RNA sequence: GGAGAGGUGGCCGAGUGGCUUAAGGCGGCGGUUUGCUAAACCGUUGUACGGCCAAAAGCUGUACCCAGGGUUCGAAUCCCUGCCUCUCCGCCA
């Protein structure tokens, strides 16, 4: 959410931003609503001031044993009027906030302007895609053939967009989680968190998934419980409504969780394999930062995520998302895209974003400089470090051999009791 | 699932409709005293949104005692609903 007075004072800039993002303008009535609301508020408040004063007078009169029925009658009337004014003001406030919550974040000035993924800017590449002397197979052929992935039984017990990992397939998934968590906690200075995978709607509103993106989420029946679409939600909300001390910043957390997404509206996209699933695992990196250092923190967070790919020797590139492709809450996003030989393209495996104060305002995440300082909204950042299922895919596809076996990258072998190769058994 | 007790400022804790401008204490901050430390003493103390002001300081208004409704001229206090915490019982990995 953007700051109300910021929008009030920079209406044209906000409108230009919406055009850059290619979105309709929800601000048509904004100025009028805002003005009317403030007028009502001032009126109601001055009447309340009078009511408070007269109530004291009534108390004083009664104490002296005098009657006050004329004043009480007057205040009865006044209270009814105040009630009406309050209600009108609240109405306008609800409308105003609804409009405000539908406005996406302002992109950082370094974000390229463009309409879609075609306008994203490549920042750098790492590693060379391997030259195969045979036709590389997709993971949805390799996995079932090796007996480490089972789509048929997943469809039976759950449905489409689910997978069962078996044997070394399951172990590989677990090894990747441990490998990533160890790297980020021991070498990159993140404190591990294992949060609930179910959160309430206040948390989802804090990070911006609600109210606009409810259709992407799984909701549990007869409750205010939702399955988390990413660890970003519980971890960013850890400090909701709290005031952190400036010297503790940046606070850096990593978390392994399962993630659940309804994938409504993605019919026909990535239908084969495990690229797009209703349930997947992810290690997430989350930072709470001072405003003035948040873009440095974005660079280092992106590096921290990229190190996972480098240790696994998986070729990747870094892309800066353009205004049209940028997420709702993000001011700037780098996608890490890993090379997938079967489709001969780079595929998103991590998305690292600086939200500036956008989430902090919604979730009321603040910090204080020194003892007497004013509270300020801090900046939040997060990125996958990495999506585990997609890393699993990248390893199986990039390390496949002509005979259908898969070599385990060196860095992962200690996590798989020294196993060097996955073969059909 | 059953029974009960609770939710008040950074923390502890008082507060049964107006004398509360939320007592008192702890902590924090500033000061006096002190060779230093400690102690004692004095002062001070939250958040949000408005108004006055060029701006800051300052002054001022409103709201906030878990949340949302209600009763009342007036609610931390009375009523209703919800959420959360704790204790005991039952069930359970």
Image (cartoon, helix red, strand yellow):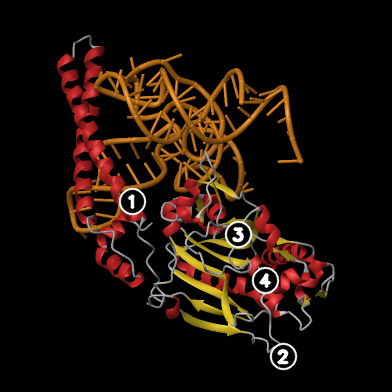
Per the image, the residue denoted by label 1 is A98
Per the image, the residue denoted by label 4 is A140
Mark 2–mark 3 Cα distance, whole angstroms, equals 34 Å
Residue closer to the observer: B28 or A342:
A342
Q: Residues within 10 Å of mark 4 (few under 14, many from 20)?
A: some
Residue closer to the observer: B30 or B47:
B47
- A416, above or below B88, in the image: below
Check if mark 4 and mark 1 are on a common chain: yes
**Is label 4 or label 1 in front?**
4
Helix, strand or loop at disc 4? Answer: helix
Quarter of the rendering containing residue A178? bottom right
Q: Earlier in the sequence, mark 1 or mark 2?
A: 1
Identify the residue at image location x=26%, y=37%: A87
Location of residue A388 in the rendering, given as x and y in whole percent from the top left corner? 65, 66
Is residue A153 left or right of A305 when viewed as pictured? right
Q: Is residue A114 visible?
A: yes
Query: What is the chain identity of the residue bearing mark 3?
Result: A
Per the image, the residue denoted by label 2 is A133
Identify the residue at image location x=79%, y=63%: A167
- B15, above or below A237, in the image: above
């Amino acid at each position: 959410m953007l700051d109300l007075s910021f929008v009030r004072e920079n209406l044209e800039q906000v409108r230009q931003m919406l055009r850059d993002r290619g979105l309709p303008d929800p601000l048509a009535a904004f100025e009028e609503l805002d003005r009317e609301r403030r007028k009502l508020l001032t009126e109601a408040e001055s009447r309340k001031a009078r009511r408070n004063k007269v109530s004291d007078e009534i108390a004083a009169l009664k104490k002296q044993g005098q009657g006050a029925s004329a004043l009480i009658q007057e205040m009865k009337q006044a209270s009814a009027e105040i009630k009406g004014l309050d209600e009108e003001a609240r109405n306008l406030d609800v409308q105003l906030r609804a409009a405000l919550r539908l406005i996406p974040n302002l992109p950082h000035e370094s974000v390229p302007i463009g309409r879609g993924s075609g306008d994203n800017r490549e920042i750098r590449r790492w590693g060379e895609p391997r030259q195969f002397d045979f036709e590389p197979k997709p993971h949805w052929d390799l996995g079932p053939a090796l007996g480490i992935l089972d789509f048929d039984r997943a469809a039976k017990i759950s449905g489409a967009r689910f997978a069962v990992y078996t044997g070394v397939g399951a172990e590989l998934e677990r090894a990747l989680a441990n490998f990533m968590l160890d790297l980020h906690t021991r070498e990159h200075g993140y404190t591990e968190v294992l949060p609930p995978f179910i959160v309430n709607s206040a948390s989802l509103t804090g990070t911006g998934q609600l109210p606009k993106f409810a259709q992407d989420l799984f909701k549990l029946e007869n409750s205010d419980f939702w399955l988390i679409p990413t660890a970003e939600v519980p971890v960013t909300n850890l400090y909701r409504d709290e005031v952190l001390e400036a010297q503790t910043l940046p606070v850096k957390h990593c978390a392994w969780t399962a993630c659940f997404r309804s994938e409504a509206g993605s019919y026909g996209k990535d239908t084969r394999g495990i690229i797009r699933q209703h349930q997947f695992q992810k290690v997430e990196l989350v930072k709470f930062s001072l405003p003035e250092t948040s873009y440095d923190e974005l660079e280092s967070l992106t590096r921290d995520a990229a190190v996972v790919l480098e240790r696994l020797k998986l070729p990747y590139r870094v892309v800066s998302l353009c205004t049209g492709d940028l997420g709702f809450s993000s001011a700037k996003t780098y996608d890490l895209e890993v090379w997938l030989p079967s489709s001969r393209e780079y595929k998103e495996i991590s998305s690292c974003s600086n939200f500036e104060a956008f989430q902090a305002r919604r979730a009321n995440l603040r910090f204080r400089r020194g003892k007497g300082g004013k509270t300020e909204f801090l900046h939040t950042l997060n990125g996958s470090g990495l999506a585990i299922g997609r890393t699993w895919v990248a390893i199986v596809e990039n390390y496949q051999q002509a005979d259908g076996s898969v070599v385990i990258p060196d860095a992962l072998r200690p996590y798989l009791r020294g196993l060097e190769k996955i073969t059909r058994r």
